């Protein structure tokens, strides 16, 4: 019982054929070809597979692709604009909030949703809103600093502006 | 980790949902947020032949309030929508306290209140709060509806009172008076994303002399299903709201629980922590009363 669905990924509509039992994370990675979204635990615990759906962070490892007909989905690939990294990407690089990088796409998308809700978060807000993203490398401190700095706009036009 | 094959339906109306439920019989499972069900299917604990996704059913989503009566939350309402609702924060504080402790932002954005109730985990976050607040459920299906107190919905370990063709439609939390207090608390190993060691919801109503007229104490994670500690409630009834009485109620609640040993804590520890948490929740509820 395959079905054609339309997903609007990073603003671009894509039609994909899916079976009911296909997970969103697999469709994004294997059918759309955007491998920035990571698979970790597959059970909702680690947040590596986080994407934004209609602006809200969700777990693509626990979402059936077939249930996402017509939905707007944002992945890490959608963040850089016109060759310039998103402010969160810049502050993560600058602060050393990335080591192996496996958690980073999910971290940055959760952080983006957090900053939309709370533009100037304190560490307590960040710990609450980022509780669903695990990092085995950084120890979280630099991630918190990077989010605070991105929120304060300290990245804007600074010498650390990164071109891609 | 692929999923086994199943048929998938996504009804747009409640009538279509009812039709699908009665046609598919016991083969079908409702899929709400999927944060319990898909984990269970992946783990091989469930293998339903049919999934009926209620994500498109607007008629199952929303929060409304009738002055003097209470607050209705439809079963498909997301936990995040409950957390963000000013109405819930103002009218149903203990539920707000409970949903803040449920999972992570991602889980709350996906998970529904109906899913938390119907999955019926003994440690489910919202259940002690809803029981303590005296909530009622509306179950629908087969062309009719019935109401029942939330605590009688749980029959046994992860077993709920839903017959063939039935589904949970809504939760009704009665209006809290300004002489009632309530609170929700839980104990877990880390600050978030943990299965609780114990969770407690309490509620009481004062009489004109400042004594406790009625109380409800609901406990999760320390028995096969969430339950009311009736004997502990009786300790409070007719007595002044004092720390001594809260401590006493905690002791009695502890003797009413039947926890198990597991990796999160021993039965002995859980029984002791019930005593502490019940007294603490009662004290928190009495402070919320003094502040209002
Ligand atoms: C990482 C992670 C962390 C979590 N943390 C917590 C936590 O801290 N506290 C907690 O309590 N839970 C937690 N959960 C469990 C889960 O998120 C909640 O129980 C959630 O509320 C389930 O809702 P859902 O909409 O996702 O349900 P689903 O998984 O869609 O459904 C759960 C069950 O209920 C049935 N069902 C759903 N809606 C209805 C309905 N309207 N009528 C009849 N049957 C229905 C389904 O058929 C299924 O059997 C966590 C889960 C994950 C993955
Ligand atoms: S892969 Fe989805 S939460 Fe870990
Ligand atoms: S940078 Fe390695 S897991 Fe976070």
Image (tube, coloured by chain):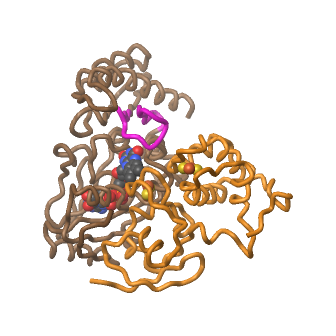
Chain colours: A orange, B brown
Residue A112 seen in this snapshot: yes
**Quadrant of residue B206 in the image?**
top left
Q: Residue at x 26, y 39 (%)?
A: B226
Q: Which residues are magenta?
A: B178-202
Magenta stretch contains residue B189: yes
Report whether residue B230 is seen: no
From the top left corner, tell me how far across and down residue A75 is, in percent: 56, 68
The residue lying furthest to the top in this view is: B244
**In the rendered image, the vertical position of residue B200 relative to residue B236, given as above or below:** below
Q: In the picture shown, does residue B99 fall above or below B53?
A: above
Marker count (numbered): 0
Question: Residue visible at 57% across and 60% down?
Answer: A105
Screen quadrant of the N terminus of chain A: bottom left
Nearer-the-camera pick, A149 or B121: A149
Between residue B50 and residue B45, name the one nearer to us.
Answer: B45
Within the image, what quadrant is residue B180 found in?
Answer: top left
Residue A77 percent across, percent down from the top left: 60, 70
Q: Is residue B224 left or right of residue B134?
A: left
Image quarter (top left, top right, bottom left or bottom right) of the C terminus of chain A: bottom right
Asked if residue B283 is positioned above or below residue B141 in the image, the reply reads above
Considering every residue shown, the one lying at the far front of the view is A100
Q: Is residue A43 left or right of residue B17?
A: right
Tell me where residue A107 appears, x and y as whole percent.
58, 55
- Say if the magenta span includes residue B158: no
- Side of A3 where A145 appears, left or right: right
Left or right: residue B142 versus residue B125 is: left
Residue A97: % across, % down:
66, 49
Quarter of the rendering containing residue A54 = bottom right
């Amino acid at each position: 019982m395959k079905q054609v669905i339309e997903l609007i990924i990073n603003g671009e509509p894509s039609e994909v054929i899916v079976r009911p039992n296909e997970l969103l994370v697999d469709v994004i990675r294997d059918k759309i070809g955007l491998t920035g979204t990571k698979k970790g635990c597959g059970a909702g615990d680690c947040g590596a597979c986080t994407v934004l759906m209609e602006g809200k962070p969700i777990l693509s490892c626990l979402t059936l692709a077939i249930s996402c007909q017509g939905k707007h989905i944002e992945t890490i690939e959608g963040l850089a604009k016109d060759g310039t990294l998103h402010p969160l990407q810049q502050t993560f690089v600058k602060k050393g909030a990335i080591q192996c990088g496996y958690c980073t796409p999910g971290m940055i998308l959760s952080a983006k949703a957090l900053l939309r809700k709370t533009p100037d978060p304190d560490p307590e807000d960040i710990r609450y809103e980022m509780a669903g993203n695990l990092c085995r490398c950084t120890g979280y401190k630099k991630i918190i600093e990077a989010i605070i700095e991105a929120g304060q706009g300290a990245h804007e036009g600074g010498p650390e502006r990164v071109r891609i | 980790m692929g999923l086994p094959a199943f048929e998938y339906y996504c009804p747009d109306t409640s009538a279509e949902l009812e039709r699908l439920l009665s046609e598919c019989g016991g083969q079908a499972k409702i899929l709400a947020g999927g944060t319990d069900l898909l984990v269970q299917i992946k783990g091989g604990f469930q293998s339903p032949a049919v999934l009926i996704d209620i994500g498109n059913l607007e008629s199952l989503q929303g929060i409304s309030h009738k002055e003097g009566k209470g607050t209705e939350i439809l079963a498909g309402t997301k936990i995040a929508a409950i957390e963000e609702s000013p109405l819930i924060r103002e009218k149903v504080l203990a539920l707000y306290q409970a949903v803040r402790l449920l999972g992570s932002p991602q889980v709350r954005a996906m998970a529904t209140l109906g899913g938390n109730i119907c999955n019926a985990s003994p440690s489910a976050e919202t259940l002690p709060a809803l029981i303590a607040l005296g909530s009622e459920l509306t179950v629908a299906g087969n062309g009719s509806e019935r109401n029942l107190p939330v605590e009688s919905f749980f029959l046994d370990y992860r077993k709920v009172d839903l017959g063939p063709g039935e589904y949970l439609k809504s939760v009704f939390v009665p209006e809290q008076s300004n002489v009632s207090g309530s609170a929700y608390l839980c104990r877990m190993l880390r600050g978030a994303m943990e299965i609780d060691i114990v969770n407690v919801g309490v509620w009481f109503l004062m009489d004109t002399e400042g004594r406790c007229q009625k109380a409800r104490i609901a406990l999760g994670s320390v028995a096969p299903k969430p339950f009311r500690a009736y004997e502990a409630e009786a300790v409070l009834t007719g007595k002044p709201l004092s720390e001594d009485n809260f401590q006493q109620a905690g002791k009695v609640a502890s003797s009413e629980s039947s926890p198990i040993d597991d990796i999160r804590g021993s039965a002995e520890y859980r029984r002791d922590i019930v005593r502490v948490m019940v007294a603490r929740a009662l004290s928190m509820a009495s402070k919320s009363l003094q502040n209002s």
